[in-house]
Amino acid sequence: MTREDSIRQIENYPPFNEQEEKDKALILGWISNNENAFSRENTVAHITASAWVVNKDRSKVLMVYHNIYNSWSWMGGHADGETDLLSVAIREVKEEAGISNVRPVSEEIFSLESLTVDGHVKKGNYVSSHLHLNITYLLEADSEEQVSVKADENSGVMWFSLEDALEKSTEPWFVEHIYSKLIKKMGI
């Protein structure tokens, strides 16, 4: 998928709520004004892709215990110049959860959001606070497939019921504004 295709996909995405409406405008504006928006070389804000990974009957969600945020969370990562954001989301799930069988429920964007990232140390280097301009995809995996930790990023990988996923995350803003929204969008 080209940069133009990704932009078009974001442009065609119908916002679910006011948060998505405002964040869609922010994301599109940032991309149009920053040639390096898809690269973390842009230290103010850059494009990321996340995955809300559910099992076949949509009763469970796969989460990782993220070392930087000290919380159970969804999976995702930096585009790092890649403009096929669905591929980025799938790659990140495979890397972070150690699974190989993950597929998109749809190739369409499931959600989008602007996420604040506090300053932190990664691989011995300080990373200043910045924004992740995030595109989320709904993916499906087999909850019976063996999972494994990616020690440099997480210290746990586990399937949770949708209710437990909300309780296990220790990031109140994510629970209230992102994870709850994703569950509502699933129609469950």
Image: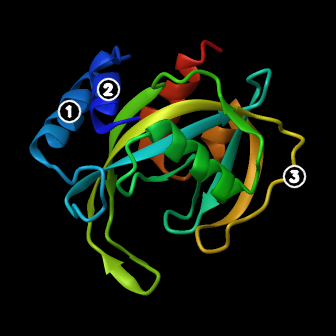
- Check if mark 1's residue and mark 2's residue have beta carbons within 8 Å: yes
- Left or right of 160: which side holds 133? left
Residues at discs 1 and 3 in contact (Cβ within 8 Å): no
Q: Which residue is found at the position 76% from the left and 25% from the top?
A: 59
Position of residue 167 measured from the top left corner of the image (x, y, whole percent): 64, 42
Give the residue type that dot 1 points to: Leu
Of marks 1 and 3, which one's residue comes earlier in the chain? Answer: 1
What x and y, as percent, mark residue 1? 41, 35
| Residue type of the residue flagged with mark 3 | Gln
- Kindly identify the residue that appears in the image at 59 percent across and 50 percent down: 91
Residue at left offset 14%, top offset 49%: 34
Q: CA distance from mark 1 to mark 2?
A: 7 Å
Where does label 3 land, which residue? 146
Placement of the C terminus among the 4 image quadrants:
top right
Residue 6, image x, y percentages: 34, 32
Q: Considering the numbered disc 1 on the image, is that residue within a helix, a strand or a loop? A: helix
